[in-house]
Image (cartoon, helix red, strand yellow):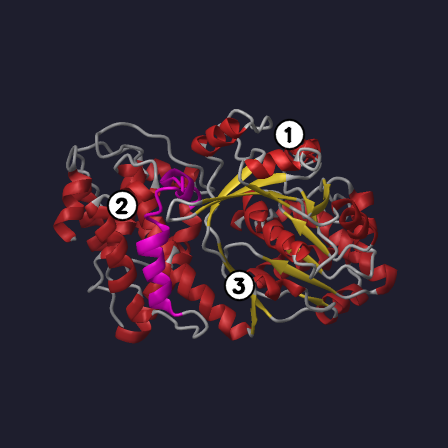
Amino acid sequence: MKLVNVEKEKELWLEKGYEVYSYDREKMIKNTRKHPEWVHFGSGNLFRAYQAAFCDKLLEEGINDKGVIVVSGRSSGSIDTYYRDFNDLYISIVLKADGQVEKKVVGSIGESVKIEEMDRLKEIFLEPSLKVASFTITEKGYKVSAKEVEDYPDTDASYFGKITKLLYERYKAGAYPLTMSSHDNCSHNGDVLKTTIKAFADKIGDEGFDNYLEEKVSFPIAMIDKITPRPDARIAKMLKEDGVEDVDELDPNYYMNCFVNSEESEYLVIEDDFANGRPSWDKAGIIFTDRETVDKVEKMKVGTCLNPVHTALAIYGCLLDHHLICEEMKDEDLSVLARRIGYEEGLPVVIDPKIIDPKDFLDTVIEVRLPNPYMPDAPQRIAMDTSQKLPVRFGETLKAYLKKLKDLKQLVYIPLVYAGWLRYLTGINDKGERFELPSDPLLEELAPYMNKYSLGDKVDKKDILDILRNDKIFGVDLEEHGLADKVVAYLNEELEGIGAVRRTLRKYL
């Protein structure tokens, strides 16, 4: 069974329990390329697990007759290897908490394009039919260097320099409206996207283009929630046993394959601000609402009901040598920590968006999503870029407490997570063994503060005060607001020796 032969071998795929698209794919591809409506930047697993999957559903139900065009992120290698070599087909595996596995061959991608293939991208952006350019390029994908902007437009090697150039070509061709829709997991993602584009647009120095971006291009904010781990060895084995020939050996340094595995739960809430006509995504369960409500949903999820719990489990999972989130939820200490972070220190200051009940959302996270034994998500994956996540996932909650109670000293579990992260930066787990720290843009800067400590050492607050006072990391200045001493005290308890992390957790839980 090969993906490129799926239509010829359809009966065989069906016998093995796979859903296979039933629409005329060749006609869809022709429609998509001739009159594109949706182009998506970011060819990773989240796109395949969510955006391309709900596009497939709309095609299957006859709601749309055009698919999505996917454009590579900063690395174009996946386009040849995991798109074009498979005729832009892939297998979606949805792992349900009750043990059911949904297997589907997805055919909704009408074309795959590399970011450097600017001639083709220009053709796409010059089409008046184009409604939406969406993005899943990760939080750090929006971080551009001052030099990238400084050298623009003379040098347009940068990712967003290219995208700004495409928008400029669309403006010159007829100033056709367009929606630029970020689906990345960062606060006010649409605003972040707009700011990044504007930085490059300002260097072009065309007032008409500036007006076009303000008046005819919209940048709605959105909240996305869909846990999509790296391809898992158990799923690869299952596919091979089914007879799928396309499965590559899993490379721990590369995150893609011919399949994507993800959880069943998913949310995408988007500000209803579409400049060239609203797409029919709501018919696939996407929620369109006003900006204020999106903001509340995002704060609920990112700052209270999911991401803080995830980060706490990621940090302590690495320290306690866990390799699956679902196994952490069987660890009584970590399960209690997750609940205390969410219910006791999160919900009291949660912002209720009304369209999704915060407690119901948190209940599902704690009782269904995180314990799902069929979801192969790892704390090591979630621990990547933690320095970028802490201010959003915990900092906003701290600010809410300051507004409400003017004091942070009563908090126990958020400071415990902060202490755990500093302990994690030593690179020594609770067994006294060295472990490799997941990638983080501040790792080179921060690790020297902590990796000089060994078990049994004591940290003097003044030696790490630069970190503790950094509100860009913690969301607030911990020294100013009375949390620095508590964090350092927890940290020193966790450094006392082998097993000290576990003992400290049990003491305060």
The x and y percentages for residue 386 are: 40, 46
Q: Quadrant of residue 442?
A: top left
Can you identify the residue that label 2 sits on? 420
Can you identify the residue that label 1 sits on? 2
**Secondary structure beneath label 1:** loop
The x and y percentages for residue 68 are: 70, 51
State which tag comes first along the sequence, 1 or 3.
1
Asked if the stretch drawn in magenta spans residue 378, the answer is yes
State which tag comes first along the sequence, 2 or 1.
1
The x and y percentages for residue 462 are: 25, 48
Q: Is residue 326 visible?
A: yes
* Type of amino acid at the residue the image marks with label 2: Gly
The magenta segment is 357-385
- Number of residues whose C-alpha sits closer than 10 Å to that of mark 3, classed few (under 14), some (14–19) or many (20 or more): many
Q: Nearer the viewer, mark 1 or mark 3?
A: 1
Screen quadrant of the N terminus:
top right
* Type of amino acid at the residue the image marks with label 1: Lys
Residue 245 sits above or below residue 410 on the image: above
Residue 54 sits above or below residue 325 on the image: below
Q: Is residue 149 visible?
A: no
Task: State the residue in front, 66 or 255.
Answer: 66
- Side (left or right) of 2 relative to 489: right
Can you identify the residue that label 3 sits on? 188
Q: Nearer the viewer, mark 2 or mark 1?
A: 1
**Secondary structure beneath label 3:** loop
State which tag comes first along the sequence, 2 or 3.
3
Task: State the residue in front, 428 or 446.
Answer: 428
- Side (left or right) of 135 relative to 369: right
How far apart are the two marked residues, 2 and 3, measured between alpha carbons? Answer: 28 Å
